[in-house]
Image: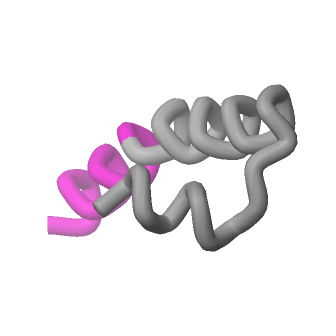
């Protein structure tokens, strides 16, 4: 069970990094980013 949980967490890292990079690249604020991610 712990292995599956760890793999899920590791799998979310690239998506989180891409989201942060995209927000920084286009200078979007948090409200715009939240609307897009919904």
Residue 7: within the magenta?
yes
**Which quadrant of the rendered structure holds the C terminus?**
bottom left
Q: In the rendering, at what x and y percent does residue 37 appear?
A: 38, 54
Q: Quadrant of residue 10?
A: top left
> Which residues make up the magenta segment?
1-11
Drawn side of residue 13 relative to residue 2, left or right: right
Identified at 59% across, 60% down, the residue is 32
Picture layout, residue 5 above or below residue 10:
below
Residue 4: within the magenta?
yes
Q: Nearer the viewer, residue 5 or 36?
A: 36
Identified at 78% across, 32% down, the residue is 26
Drawn side of residue 9 relative to residue 23, left or right: left
Which scheme is used to colour this image of the protein? one colour
Magenta span main SS: helix
Q: Nearer the viewer, residue 20 or 36?
A: 36
Identified at 27% across, 62% down, the residue is 5
Q: In the rendering, at what x and y percent does residue 24 appear?
A: 84, 39
Q: In the rendering, at what x and y percent does residue 15 appear?
A: 47, 37
Identified at 41% across, 52% down, the residue is 36
Picture layout, residue 21 above or below residue 13:
above
Q: In the rendering, at what x and y percent does residue 31 appear?
A: 61, 71
Q: Quadrant of residue 27?
A: top right
* Number of numbered callouts drawn: 0
Picture layout, residue 15 above or below residue 25:
below
**Which quadrant of the rendered structure holds the N terminus?**
bottom left
Drawn side of residue 12 relative to residue 28, left or right: left
């Amino acid at each position: 069970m712990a292995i599956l949980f760890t793999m899920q967490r590791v799998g979310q890292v690239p998506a989180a990094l891409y989201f942060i990079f995209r927000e920084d690249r286009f200078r979007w604020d948090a409200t715009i980013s939240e609307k897009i991610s919904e």
